[in-house]
Amino acid sequence: MLQEYREGLLYDEEGRLCFGESKFLVEDLALEFGTPLYVYSASLIQGALREFYGALKSQAGGRSFLICYSVKANSNLSILRLIQKEGAGADIVSAGELHRCRKAGIDPQKIVFSGVGKSPEELEYGLKEGILLFSVESADELFLLDKLARRHGIQARVSLRINPDLTASTHPYISTGGRKDKFGIPSEEILDISLRFREKCQEKDREKSQKKSQDSKGDTGGVEICGLGFHIGSQILDTSSFEQAATILCELRSSLQKSGFSIRYLDVGGGIGIRYKDEKTPAIKDYLTCLFRKLPQDADLNLLFEPGRFIIGNAGILITKILLSKNNRGNKIYVCDAAMNDLMRPALYQSYHEILAHRKERGKCNSSLVGPICESGDFFANERLLPSFEQGDYAAICSCGAYGFSMSSNYNSRLRLAEVLIQGNKAKLIRQRERYEDLLSLEESCMF
């Protein structure tokens, strides 16, 4: 009887590693599409989304909600189309991500534009597309967005992202709600900034009404502050941080409502952790319970959730081929054809990814799996108990769906790899492997 080893991964009766709903052999995928190779499971992506939706429906108590998938986790067009078909929207952090979402057919009224430093061009793009909300993280951005919206005669909805001064128990590089983090507006400044902004807008409106000539043709737009939100970090395993943030969020909403603002959107971000090794991850129902016990039950309130890693993280693997092995003064080292430019997380966060051999009978030995890049940080596992690989073997690096390909680069002029989506009984190429022509295409015409 087959038994699942990890999400979507199992060894069959012959000890061969399989992945996806149709149990594609990892070795067959490598031979057909080449390596290194990202492979995703559509059923795992859909399953995570449906689990989230199901838990929301059972606990929302009639409150409106929208899942806005965090595009930065994995922005492949086919992944976005799959998510769009499940009814989800998108949380974006750049104009490029907005362009991808619109190409994938995601309704602009389901898109939230986040990010600590949006350019004027990016803000204008969002205005012209008619997105649902701008998540604004500074007074400067708020006033700039209002100026641009008035210029184009567009009414823009804004959610102010608060910085609640909470340090989530996660890697410091992905903690985003602490006192010294660059993200959000300090919670104690939210009310003052909102009142100051409203006063300035009222001044502009009075000045405009006093003008005899219509010099500002089309200047009928502006910004409406109608939401509040937070995102305190990523890969969070302790739900108490979310509950604390939600408490602060609701207190601020009450203060703004009393001051005449209609706060109809509450954005609780994302950040729930997944299993990479042996972490005890929170059940989605427990995560939502801690939020819903704090969030108000107003009939006109819209709740926004922005999961990324939870949806895609465990739905993807990276297949790589063992090029050679060597012993450096007693240290066993396996060199593979994937590298840090393909999967940056181990080098950047010292993150753990489980590594499996394509054949179960491989023994174990204390060793390292590294890539061919000229950096000591180019590794996937250092001095760990790994399969005893042989030259030509294939390794599956697990839980690479999130922040794998999306953080990849052409460092060392390496070609970015292909991506495949397993859907039903088919394995579909959803991104071609780059060619040398692609590597040079933006430079050759400019070469002097």
Image: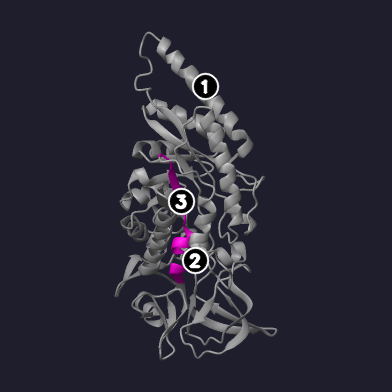
Residue 345: x %, y % from top left: 56, 64
Residue extending farthest to the right is 329
Q: Bin the neighbour count of mark 1 within 10 Å (Cα to Cα): few under 14, some 14-19, many 20 and up.
A: few
Tag 3 near tag 1, CB within 8 Å: no
The answer to which of marks 2 and 1 sits earlier in the sequence is 1
C-alpha gap between disc 3 and disc 1: 31 Å
Please tell me the numbered disc located at residue 127.
none
- For badge 2, the amino acid type reads Asp
Q: Nearer the viewer, mark 3 or mark 1?
A: 3
Question: Magenta span covers which residues?
Answer: 300-317
Relative depth, front residue between 73 and 202: 202
* 47 to 243, vertically: above or below: below
* In-image side of 16 versus 168 (left or right): left
- Residue highlighted by disc 2: 342
Residue drawn 44% across and 78% down? 9
* 133 to 212, vertically: above or below: below
The answer to which of marks 3 and 1 sits earlier in the sequence is 1
Residue 114: x %, y % from top left: 48, 44
Relative depth, front residue between 437 and 4: 4
Q: Nearer the viewer, mark 2 or mark 3?
A: 3
- Residue highlighted by disc 3: 305
Residue 7 falls in image quadrant: bottom left
- For badge 3, the amino acid type reads Phe
- For badge 1, the amino acid type reads Lys
C-alpha gap between disc 2 and disc 1: 48 Å
Which element type, helix, strand or loop, lies under badge 2?
Answer: loop
